[in-house]
Amino acid sequence: MKKILILPLVLVCLIQGSMAQVTPKWVEKAKRAVFSIVTYDKNDKMLNTGNGFFVSEDGLALSDYTLFKGAARAVIITPDGKEMPVNVILGANDMYDVIKFRVAITEKKVPALTVATTVPAVESSAWLLPYSTQKSIACESGKVKEVSKIAGEYHYYTLGMPMKDKMVSCPVMNAEGQVFGVSQKSSGADSVNTCYAVGVSFAMSQKITALSLGDATLRNIGIRKGLPEDEEQALVYLYMTASQLPAADYLRVLDEFVAQFPNNTEGYYRRASYNIANAKGDEALLDKAAADLEQALKIAQKKEDAYYSIAKIIHAYQLSKPEKTYKDWTYDTALADVRKALALDPLPLYSQLEGDILFAKQDYAGALASYEKVNASNLASAATYYSAAKTKELMKGDLKEVMALMDSCVARCPKPLTDEYAPYVLERAQMYMNADEPRKALLDYDDYFKATNGNVNDLFYYYREQAALKSRQYQRALDDIAKAIELNPKDLTYQTENAVVNLRVGRYDEAIQILDKIINEDPKYAEAYRLRGLCKAQQKKTDDACIDLKKAKELGDTNADTLIEKYCK
């Protein structure tokens, strides 16, 4: 009886063991989605080899980050021997060693695995699908031993199955032939019977954002990065890359943005501006820019914004002073476009551009009228009042009115004054000097100095010295001109000004020493002779003074005539 009972039990075990080794039907199709990867460094030397797999038919793929670290390029090799380059990196995580990328596929579509939508249960069956060029393929099979949470909503798996080193970054499949994990390198004593996998959903969640340019993980990969999938993030990314990428790389980003978001006008405007800036007379690039502007106007939902943007680009093009104007890209065309925008919506922003274009055309009265509209609106700012002040100054308007506009400009600067707004205060200081109000000018120069943390040049010290001299603050004048000379000791204008200040305070010997040095360096410096002659006249050395004054006149200094009449009779 016992033998009869035992025999069926043995048969059942044998049958069950045999069934456990059966290769699932989906393997033959799924294995075509697994590929080998070869990465290369910047010297085009082989860096690493490993595995990866497609998760979409248009070339989206996953692998391990370690494989790509330090890589300048990479290629994938399919089971049937086809090579395809890795096109762009779309996200990476060094902690969990995963990377998402897109392959530049050489056919309409590639074999891809279906991503599981449910988390496998503990003790459910799992298969590890390795890369293979052979007709038959040996899968590793086992059980899901543990499911852990990572990064909030994603999962990490402990699997009861062996894994060889060459199986890192291969897909881990469920019974339905869907991929739920990316195998990871095992370590430790239990690696013979245990391996691990990070969830495919977590790997798929990796993405490029506007802040990815500063991401150290991504910066360690020299392969081009893709655009963010989110349109707003992509826009910010576009702005940031403009100043951080080489020109050719930035153009590729622009092309990708236009291709990815064909109904966003910003891509067309930026690509047009790029091509205009790099045209240097190349009409082919200008034709491309014109086509982009035409397409932007065509797709724009708000035509007034399109007219404004196009006017702004043409205005900037004319400001660059092209040797030959492209077609009708003139100030008049820009003006016509911005007025179309104003006709649709009289925004102050459009009036500002209208004023800028009229200013460039030297129609100062028209420009001032536009700027006054802006200053009467909620767009009024330090910049808009400055524009109005400079326009009125060029019109030779009432100086008090010019200064009132500059006062309004400075009043709209933040307090304390920042480096960004400091130039407005410097401009007002110059205007105060022109208005013969040196003490007010001196206060503005001091505010500018403070706002820039003393980061000024020799010319600043020269200008402030003149304000101090006219304000009769002689020690300040001496200190500032000394600083200007320290920063630019070869400029004889500063040396001469130093002599003038010393002369003004009655330090004739010091002034003469300075002037002797100047004349020694430049024997034809007429002003130095005149000033030295004046110093000697003050010292009652009339004969010597007259020699210098006559020499100054001989060298063309007409200011010496009055002094000669006074001292050399």
Image (cartoon, helix red, strand yellow):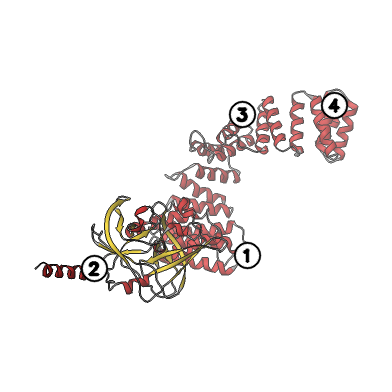
Image location (x, y in percent) of residue 125: 25, 63
Q: Amino acid at mark 2?
A: Gly
Which kind of residue does numbered mark 1 sit on? Answer: Lys
Residue of label 1: 324
Which residue is drawn at the image coordinates 25% and 66% (left, top)? 175
Q: Is residue 545 left or right of residue 371?
A: right
Element on which disc 2 rests: helix
Numbered mark located on residue 536 in the image: 4
Give the structural element (helix, strand or loop) at label 1: loop
What is the spatial separation of the Cα atoms under label 4 and label 2, in whole angstroms?
A: 119 Å
Q: Position of residue 109 (x, y in %)?
A: 38, 73
Label 4 crowd bin: few (<14), some (14–19), many (20+), radius 10 Å: many
Residue position marked by numbered label 3 in the rendering: 439
Q: Quadrant of the N terminus?
A: bottom left
Whichever of callouts 2 and 1 sits on the residue coming sooner in the sequence is 2
In the image: residue 400, left or right of residue 549: left
In space, the residues marked 2 and 1 are separated at their CA atoms by 84 Å
Q: Residue at x 78, y 24 (%)?
A: 507
x and y, in percent, of residue 449 in the image: 59, 34
Q: Which residue lies under the disc numbered 2?
A: 17
- Structural crowding at the residue carrying mark 2, measured as other residues with C-alpha within 10 Å and reported as few (<14), some (14–19) or many (≥20): few
**Residue 115 seen in render:** no
- The type of residue carrying mark 4 is Lys
